[in-house]
Amino acid sequence: MRITLKAVPVALLVSMIWLAPGCGGDDDSDGGAAGSAGTNVRGGSTGEGGEDSGGTGATGTGQGGASEGGNPGTGQGGASEGGNPGTGQGGASEGGNPGTGGDDGAGGALPETLDCLGDPLLETAPDNVVISGLVTTLGNVIINGALVEGRAASDDGLLGDDTSALNGSYELTVPTGGAPLDAYLYVSADGSVDSYVYPPIPFVDDDELDVPLITSALRTGIADEANVTLEADTGVLYVFVRDCNGDPVEGATVTTNPPGDLSYTAGFVPAPDATSTDGSGAAYIFNLPPGNVEVDATIDGYSLREHTIDVRANVMTITSVIP
């Protein structure tokens, strides 16, 4: 995952490319829970299926080919004999229920950029993962001497630390024990608000995180643009919605539990009247109470992968939501 920062008039411009779960899997010629289609181009629960007459399971959200007796779910169904193509694009159907697709079953299929939705996460990781990147200011000015710590999400235990070099770079080698690492970054520098950066899923491989730091005055200025008065001892959350390719998602709605004062952006500046994300995929949530906060997003009626982070008072917390 990478966070990059560019200068903007008021708010940060962060293009976050987070690690998204892989949209692939093994070729599957027997359907099952991953789909009734046989040879899958992309296996797993969202794989694209080839032609097969043997599957009996639900295809979930993938694109299914010819299926006999299967339940293609919400994917794009080809010829189906006795199946229930659901809401996807259905081809010829004998004895099946073509669902709500309309002519030839068109409409209702999962967008291709969200075709990894619901894929299982990896269950193993290398013994060590390397987390590296740059620490910068709002104006994309390098910060050297910033403290960067990797900490365990479970108990805030220190996993590794570094100090950003003259070029702003840092690098942490963090042990995982061979399992996905549920961790976050804590970044601090003189004159800046402390930042906590949470990935949307545990670390399962080397990652890059360019961390932006803002001043206290800028945090207040961002809230002013959103027509929000910052309350004492509350947290500010900066959320990015990403698709399976790591690209920003436009038109997404963000939710948190507990809720705060939500403001989407327009041109990376808070837009009080906006009702969903713009091309940046970004949203601010102000005045969140400290403690565990569930973060989720919805696009085209599909709920993405919810995760929980620890929001702290009087700092900036950054995360993203992915399928």
Image (spheres, grey):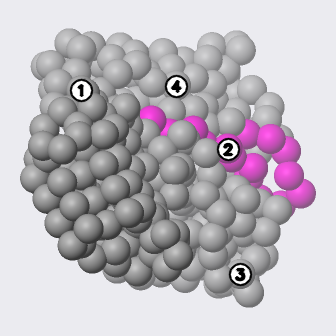
Q: Which residues are magenta?
A: 5-19
State yes or no: discs 1 and 2 in contact (Cβ < 8 Å).
no
Q: Is residue 287 above or below residue 192?
A: below
Residue of label 3: 274
Q: Amino acid at mark 4?
A: Glu
**Left or right of residue 289, residue 225 in this image:** right
Cα distance between the residues tagged 3 and 2: 19 Å
The tag earlier along the polypeptide, 1 or 2, is: 2
Instruction: Give whichever of 216, 90 is nearer the camera.
Output: 90
Q: Amino acid at mark 3?
A: Ala
Q: Is residue 271 above or below residue 178?
A: below
- Residue 148 placed where, x, y %? 47, 28
The tag earlier along the polypeptide, 1 or 3, is: 1
Cα distance between the residues tagged 1 and 4: 27 Å
Few, some or many residues within 10 Å of mark 2 (<14, 14–19, 20+): many
Residue of label 4: 208
Few, some or many residues within 10 Å of mark 3 (<14, 14–19, 20+): some
The tag earlier along the polypeptide, 3 or 2, is: 2
**Is residue 73 found inside the magenta-colored segment of the image?**
no
**Is residue 307 visible in this depiction of the protein?**
no
- Residue 201 placed where, x, y %? 33, 43
**Is residue 6 found inside the magenta-colored segment of the image?**
yes
The tag earlier along the polypeptide, 2 or 4, is: 2
Q: Which mark is residue 15?
A: 2
Task: Tell me what residue is drawn at x 51 percent, y 50 percent.
Answer: 112
Label 1 or label 4, whichever lies nearer to me, is 1
Task: Tell me what residue is drawn at x 76 percent, y 77 percent.
Answer: 271
Q: Quadrant of residue 68?
A: bottom left
